[in-house]
Image (cartoon, rainbow, N blue to C red):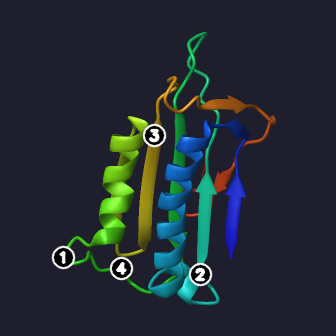
Amino acid sequence: MAVLDGPEVVLKAEAAQALSMVLHELATNAAKYGALSRSEGRVSVCWPRALNGPEPSPLVIEWLETGGPAVQPPSNPGYGRSVITELVPYELGGTARLLFSPEGVQCGIELPPSPRTNARCYSNGRKCWWPSRRAWC
């Protein structure tokens, strides 16, 4: 099962294409090896709207897998890992962190509000709930 939660986001086409490649790689790996490879597995994707004052805030996307098989860090960084960790900084000027914890893969992506991404969030008044963290995003 997948849970997606966050406000409406507007991105430039180029930024949307790069971000979709990263999310596609994460989803493919979750289906093959991770949480989505089991019926009880779950992927939560949350992009809360950060309220940091009058300045535009970065778009932060959190990917969290739970309920899948125990995760082992890959012995060799492959193409998929480079797509996730290198495409975001190179194409979008952001950061991507990838964590292979035994409970599930976690990925955090941060895109700056810049002309390159045109990342803008629109609040829908909701927050998302992370069950494993027992906290709101």
Q: Is residue 89 above or below residue 71?
A: above
> Looking at the picture, how far across and down is residue 85, in whole percent?
33, 54
Report the residue at 43% width, 72% height from top. Answer: 104
Tell me if mark 4 has few (under 14), some (14-19) or many (20+) residues whose alpha carbon lies within 10 angstroms of its own: some
Q: Which residue is mark 2?
A: 41
Labelled disc at residue 63: none
Q: Which residue is mark 3?
A: 110
**Viewer-nearest of discs 1 and 2:** 1
Tell me if mark 2 has few (under 14), some (14-19) or many (20+) residues whose alpha carbon lies within 10 angstroms of its own: some
Looking at this view, is 91 or 121 the one in front?
Answer: 91
Closer to the N terminus: mark 1 or mark 2? 2
Q: Which residue is mark 1?
A: 76
Residue type at mark 2: give it. Answer: Gly
Q: Secondary structure at mark 4?
A: loop
Q: CA distance from mark 3 to mark 2?
A: 25 Å
Q: Which residue is mark 4?
A: 71
Q: Is residue 92 above or below residue 114?
A: below
Q: Secondary structure at mark 1?
A: loop
Q: CA distance from mark 1 to mark 2?
A: 25 Å
Closer to the N terminus: mark 4 or mark 3? 4
> Looking at the picture, how far across and down is residue 26, in whole percent?
48, 68
Tell me if mark 3 has few (under 14), some (14-19) or many (20+) residues whose alpha carbon lies within 10 angstroms of its own: some
Residue 136 relative to residue 99: left or right: right
Residue type at mark 1: give it. Answer: Asn
Closer to the N terminus: mark 3 or mark 2? 2
Report the residue at 61% width, 23% height from top. Answer: 51
Residue type at mark 3: give it. Answer: Glu
